[in-house]
């Protein structure tokens, strides 16, 4: 495995509708924010090249539709993902409750080889909204992430660009680690059984 | 290798005859033979009902030509028979065979080609039938045409080389095979363009794709030279196939190489080629046989040996039906054969049986759907067979991908797996093995033969065209029987016809030998070694079935098994997703709510390439309900299998699966999870399925355990049960109450969270039931719940308020011996009684024993609620003997009562309560002493609130005036202050009057003059005597005109 070959990381962003998946991605890639809401239909992706430990990697960020009626993605879409970003709105407790569902569904669809160690990152978005409207405390979110195997957790604001950069840096790092371990595993999966002890061995011509 | 065609000899000339068959033409039911001695024979082909073919010689034209007749063609539209003989093209009448014309110009002709098309006149656009004849004379191309039966001499086009072969590509283009190359000639424009082979494509063409032709990587460069004749033929649609030596290229009608088909190489240069839908036929005179190929895959399908074969004649396809050329003739100098096709169903079945699934798919795809029953379904079926074959070859990813592509019913894929995954579905295979298990050494071969039988088992089904419904274990047996029957009944197609030996026959035993020789160790029977060997054999395509047999003996295990299961889970997850979408959209319960489906959603369903009917093996005639039922059953199968797969290979995925909405079979999952000790997931699963009782039972079992169970440490203690109960809603109240019991006993504080949590669900629980339940458990808990309901949830129903009061009271009574909390509880009771307005005081009063000192004050509060101030005060004065409380009670009541407006002096009520108190002090009921002291204090403090005369009347005679001093003083001061206040008010009002009068006179001074001529500035009409408005600026307008400027001062008309 050549360490310097160009790496493409597939990152999938999931979460309820209106939690700010598109906005987070837009803020990270384009440094832009729009306060008008437009539902994502199907899925859409943006790419960004980043340096992770002086390796250049291309992140392919897949933004998905949170609204059920726009979800038309099949198993093929999820396959080969390197990291899954779960987003909720800290001012909307239902979007937090749904994280588990998103995570479970992702695992079923993506069917990673090692579901226990598949990297997730949880983002609690919209922390710029006034404190009184907040429904999910940082403590509660952290406890959840802890219980799911120490998922990295970030509180972000796509609007004010708070912690977006840091979050995606971790996402890139974890995705890269996943990609590399998968590569390794691909090799082990495809073990070729060579029978040295075969008496009839040698060229079969 | 199949039997696509079979040859029937229909005519035989004795060896002693002095002529040979040189050319052949068939049209309608006529067969014309051009002989080497210049004789033309015309036969009529008769097919008897039994299928026998007879020829009747209609006529013999002896002197048709002086020399041998080399080529024949007919132009039916012009009733002309075109022949090439003695270097000339001659035209005869088609019926009478009399010579019409010898085309003198064609002297030295080597070949010709005819075509008939409907062409539109370039200027008028009127369509007419145009037949064209192109004759190759050395390097020249001569063109003739018939338009509406009128013969027209056309132009001449000179080419770069001698014309060897001609094929019409379209009505205006034709391909001319020259000595060294092919050119495309546009006869209208008169242009000639070279046809170049796609060199790059040949070099990169994967060997596999060119397997039928022998992958030699030959390019166009190799096409020149040597004497072999360049030949070409038109294929289906607009494609043409050009062959020179052993190289073949596909082009479209404009001469561009076809993009989807690579240039290929023929193993041996053919002498003639033709297209008989859907195959390419090539004639190899040297080898004395014909080869049938599939143009799409270029695979050799059949080899038909015909001794001495030289002539291949396929009647030109009709204008509209591309498969019209199904029947064709071949001839050797002494024999004529008619070629008949085997019907396509049989061909496909043969291919499937031979395991040439790719070939079968390709053939199906080329055939028009009208020729076959349910073409799509056949393709799908064969693709599924292919997927199964791929699976056996351990190409799991491709296999499952194919299953997904055709929306295969999941059971098809599932039953490929052993029982640990497939459950009941695996019973089919298990049975086979057990049946065959008794003969140990032969087991392997038996198993494989069974498997191949199983494959065949699908064929009879297909012929029926009725897909079987459901795949139970019972039917599996039947299927097996059927397959065996099918094998027995297999018809032997060869009869008296010449044996059309399929080449594969030669190959198959070879394959077997390979197996025995190279694979004594089963592990070595890998795909790779097999492919090496098959590469060595002359025909590169090895029967896939043969290969399967080689590998399938080994059961799936280890990494391979994991890999297979992993691919299966991906396929199943995909199917699951699609199914859930369907179930969501077609849920009858939901539909009942939403009414009939909107056109929008229907449209969306159609767009989906995924066909639900396929997945659930449905026939379209069934009702929507039963379809839904089937989909549910399929979903159950999918999810249950997915579960089994996860348990075996990825236990961590079980949790996600059971937590998501699923259709898993609870029996299977329950047992399995229990066996695996995955109780945590089991609870989640039960929860997701709504099997709350099972979940709670389990939780209780683990939660109550003395020590943590190492299998499920998280389940210990009441926390999980509480969390679980909190997710249940009001409809589950029985369960909630049943299982809340042990939790409350274990930890009342935590347990109460079930009812007290600030969630919608906790709030919506039926409060009476909860209260009843809690009260039975403990009064304190009931009180806590009621406090929550009343204070936090602001429930105002009197029943709860009454109950809470009663609970406080009885709790105080119960706990009399534990005085430490008493005060707190009393305070609570008192606060509650004071604040709540919802309890019924009469009832509460009966609960409060009048003689219990604890309840004196509560009684007073309740009485005051009833308006019985006297009784309330009696309690304060005589029972509690607390004058301050009595007084503050009066003050409270006084404040609560709103002062009667403008009649403060007369207001009897407010002072009434003080009066009652005073009365109680001074004229108590006989049992009590008069209390002068408090009475005087009351008088001095609140004297003003008492009616003076009444109060004084009550004061006992012997009271000293001195003691009343403060009372009088207060009283006088109060009166005085009232007087002063009134005087001040009077003065203020007076000054106000002056001010108002002044304003009035100021206003009166204002005026406005309206004369005869005065005009309204707004409407420019005279003001006259109409009502006017004077605007603040002094402008006078009509009242109506001034309406826009509302802030006007109105001045009446007579003010002028």
Image (spheres, coloured by chain):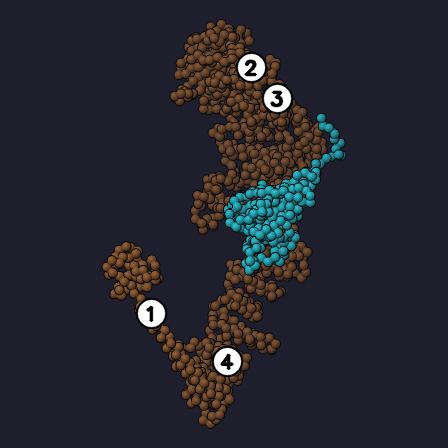
- For marks 1 and 4, the one nearer the N-term is 4
Q: What element carries label 4?
A: helix
Residue to which mark 1 is pinned: B1002
Does the residue at mark 3 contact the one at mark 1 (Cβ under 8 Å)? no
Q: Mark 2 lies on which chain?
A: B
Q: Spot the brown chain and give its letter.
A: B
Q: Spot the cyan chain and give its letter.
A: A
Marking on residue B313: none
> What residue occupies the far bottom of the structure in this picture?
B958
Residue at coordinates 61% horizontally, 34% vertically from top-left? B389
Measured as percent of width and height from the top left, residue B679 is found at 63, 54
The answer to whether residue B1054 is seen in the rendering is: yes
- Can you tell which of label 3 and label 1 is closer to the viewer? 1
Residue to which mark 3 is pinned: B219
The CA span between labels 2 and 1 is 124 Å
- Classify mark 1: residues with Cα within 10 Å, few (<14), some (14-19) or many (20+): few
The CA span between labels 3 and 1 is 118 Å
- For marks 2 and 4, the one nearer the N-term is 2
- For marks 2 and 3, the one nearer the N-term is 2
Looking at the picture, tell me which residue is in the foreground, A140 or B421: A140
- Can you tell which of label 3 and label 4 is closer to the viewer? 4
- Horizontal side of B524 relative to B118 (left or right) equals right
The quarter of the picture where the C terminus of chain A appears is top right
Residue to which mark 2 is pinned: B178
Residue to which mark 4 is pinned: B888
Measured as percent of width and height from the top left, residue A50 is found at 64, 43
């Amino acid at each position: 495995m050549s360490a310097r070959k160009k790496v493409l990381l597939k990152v999938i962003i999931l979460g309820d509708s209106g939690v700010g998946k598109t906005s987070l991605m837009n803020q990270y890639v384009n440094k832009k924010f729009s306060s008008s809401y437009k539902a994502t239909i199907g899925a859409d992706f943006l790419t960004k090249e980043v340096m992770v430990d002086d390796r250049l990697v291309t992140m392919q960020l897949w933004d998905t539709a949170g609204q059920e009626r726009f979800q038309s993605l099949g198993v093929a879409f999820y396959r080969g993902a390197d990291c899954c970003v779960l987003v909720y709105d800290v001012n909307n407790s239902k979007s937090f409750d749904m994280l588990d569902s998103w995570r479970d569904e992702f695992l079923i669809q993506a069917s990673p080889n090692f579901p226990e160690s598949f990297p997730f990152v949880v983002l609690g978005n919209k922390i710029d909204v006034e404190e009184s409207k907040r429904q999910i405390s940082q403590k509660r979110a952290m406890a959840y992430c802890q219980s799911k195997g120490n998922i990295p957790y970030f509180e972000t604001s796509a609007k004010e660009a708070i912690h977006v950069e840091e979050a995606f840096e971790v996402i890139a790092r974890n995705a890269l680690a996943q990609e590399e371990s998968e590569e390794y595993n691909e090799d082990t999966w495809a073990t070729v059984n060579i029978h040295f002890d075969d008496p009839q061995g040698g060229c079969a011509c | 290798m199949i039997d696509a065609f079979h040859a029937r000899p229909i005519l035989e000339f004795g060896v002693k005859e002095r002529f040979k068959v040189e050319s052949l033409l068939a049209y309608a039911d006529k067969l014309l033979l051009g002989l080497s001695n210049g004789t033309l024979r015309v036969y009529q082909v008769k097919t008897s009902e039994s299928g026998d073919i007879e020829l009747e010689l209609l006529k013999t034209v002896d002197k048709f030509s002086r020399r041998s007749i080399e080529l024949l063609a007919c132009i039916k539209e012009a009733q002309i028979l075109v022949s090439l003989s003695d270097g000339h093209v001659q035209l005869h009448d088609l019926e009478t065979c009399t010579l019409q014309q010898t085309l003198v110009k064609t002297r030295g002709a080597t070949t010709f080609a005819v075509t008939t098309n409907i062409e539109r006149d370039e200027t008028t656009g009127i369509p007419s039938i145009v037949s064209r004849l192109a004759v190759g004379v050395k390097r020249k191309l001569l063109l003739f045409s018939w338009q509406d039966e009128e013969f027209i001499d056309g132009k001449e086009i000179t080419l770069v080389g001698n014309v060897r072969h001609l094929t019409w590509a379209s009505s205006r283009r034709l391909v001319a095979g020259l000595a060294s190359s092919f050119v495309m000639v546009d006869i209208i424009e008169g242009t000639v363009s070279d046809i170049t082979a796609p060199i790059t494509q040949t070099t990169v063409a994967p060997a596999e794709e060119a397997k039928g032709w022998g992958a030699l990587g030959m390019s166009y460069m190799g096409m020149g030279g040597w004497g072999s004749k360049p030949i070409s033929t038109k294929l289906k649609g607009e494609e043409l196939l050009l062959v020179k030596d052993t190289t073949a290229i596909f082009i479209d009608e404009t001469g561009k190489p076809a993009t989807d088909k690579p240039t290929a190489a023929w193993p041996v240069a053919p002498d003639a080629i033709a297209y008989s839908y859907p195959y390419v036929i090539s004639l190899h005179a040297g080898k004395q046989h014909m080869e049938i190929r599939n143009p799409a895959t270029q695979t050799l399908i059949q080899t038909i040996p015909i001794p001495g074969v030289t002539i291949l004649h396929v009647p030109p396809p009709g204008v509209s039906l591309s498969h019209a050329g199904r029947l064709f003739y071949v001839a050797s100098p002494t024999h004529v054969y008619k070629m008949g096709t085997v019907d396509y169903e049989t061909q496909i079945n043969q291919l499937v049986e031979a395991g040439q699934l790719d070939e079968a798919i390709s053939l199906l795809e080329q055939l028009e759907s009208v020729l076959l029953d349910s073409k799509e379904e056949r393709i799908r079926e064969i693709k599924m067979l292919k997927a199964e074959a791929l699976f056996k070859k351990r190409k799991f990813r491709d296999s499952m991908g194919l299953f997904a592509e055709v929306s295969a019913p999941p059971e098809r894929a599932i039953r490929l797996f052993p029982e640990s995954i497939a459950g009941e579905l695996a019973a089919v295979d298990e049975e086979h093995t057990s049946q065959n298990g008794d003969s140990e050494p032969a087991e392997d071969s038996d198993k494989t033969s069974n498997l191949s039988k199983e494959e065949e088992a699908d064929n009879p089904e297909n012929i029926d065209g009725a897909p079987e419904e459901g795949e139970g274990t019972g039917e599996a047996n039947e299927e097996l029987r059927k397959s065996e029957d099918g094998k027995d009944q297999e018809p032997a197609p060869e009869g008296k016809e010449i044996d059309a030996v399929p080449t594969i026959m030669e190959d198959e035993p070879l394959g077997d030998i390979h197996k025995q020789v190279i694979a004594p160790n089963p592990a070595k029977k890998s795909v790779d070694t097999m492919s090496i060997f098959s590469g060595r054999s002359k025909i590169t395509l090895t029967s896939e079935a043969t290969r399967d047999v080689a590998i399938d003996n080994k059961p799936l295990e280890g990494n391979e098994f994991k890999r297979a299961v992993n691919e299966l889970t991906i396929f199943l997850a995909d199917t699951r997703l699609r199914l859930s979408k369907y179930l969501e959209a077609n849920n009858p319960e939901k539909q009942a709510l939403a009414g009939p489906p909107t056109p929008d959603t229907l449209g969306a369903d159609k767009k989906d390439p995924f066909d639900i009917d396929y997945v659930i093996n449905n026939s379209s005639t069934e009702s929507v309900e039963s379809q839904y039922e089937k989909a549910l059953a399929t979903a159950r199968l999918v999810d249950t299998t997915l579960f089994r797969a996860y348990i075996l290979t990825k236990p961590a995925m079980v949790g996600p699966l059971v937590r998501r909405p699923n259709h898993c079979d609870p029996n299977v999952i329950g047992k399995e999870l229990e066996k695996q000790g995955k109780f945590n997931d089991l609870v989640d699963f039960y929860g997701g399925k709504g099997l709350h009782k099972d979940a709670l039972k389990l939780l209780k079992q683990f939660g109550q355990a003395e020590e943590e169970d190492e299998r499920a440490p998280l389940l210990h203690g009441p926390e999980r049960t509480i969390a679980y109960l909190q997710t249940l809603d009001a409809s589950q109240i029985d369960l909630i109450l049943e299982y809340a019991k042990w939790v409350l006993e274990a930890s009342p504080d935590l347990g109460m969270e079930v009812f007290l949590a600030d969630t919608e669900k906790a709030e919506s629980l039926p409060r009476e039931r909860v209260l009843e339940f809690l009260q039975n458990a403990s009064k304190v808990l009931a009180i806590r719940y009621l406090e929550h309901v009343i204070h936090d949830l602001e429930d105002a129903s009197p029943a709860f308020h009454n109950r809470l009061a009663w609970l406080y009271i009885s709790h105080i009574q119960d706990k009399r011996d534990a005085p430490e909390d008493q005060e707190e509880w009393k305070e609570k009771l008192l606060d509650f009684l004071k604040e709540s307005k919802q309890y019924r005081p009469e009832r509460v009063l009966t609960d409060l024993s009048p003689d219990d000192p604890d309840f004196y004050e509560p009684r007073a509060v309740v009485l005051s609620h009833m308006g019985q101030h006297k009784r309330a005060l009696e309690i304060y004065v005589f029972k509690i003997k607390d004058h301050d409380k009595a007084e503050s009670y009066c003050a409270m009541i006084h404040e609560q009562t709103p002062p009667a407006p403008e009649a403060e002096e007369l207001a009897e009520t407010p002072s009434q309560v003080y009066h009652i108190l005073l009365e109680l002090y001074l004229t108590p009921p006989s049992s009590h002493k008069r209390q002068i002291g408090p009475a005087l204090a009351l008088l001095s403090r609140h004297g003003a609130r008492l009616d003076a005369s009444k109060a004084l009347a009550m004061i006992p005679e012997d009271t000293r005036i001195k003691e009343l001093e403060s009372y009088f003083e207060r009283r006088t001061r109060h009166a005085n202050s009232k007087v002063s206040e009134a005087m001040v008010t009077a003065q203020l009002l007076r000054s106000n009057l002056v001010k108002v009068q002044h304003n009035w006179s100021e206003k009166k001074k204002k005026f406005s003059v309206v004369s005869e001529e005065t005009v309204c500035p707004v409407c420019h009409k005279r003001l006259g005597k109409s009502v006017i408005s004077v605007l603040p600026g002094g402008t006078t307008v009509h009242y109506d005109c001034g309406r826009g400027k509302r802030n006007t001062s109105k001045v009446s008309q007579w003010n002028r």
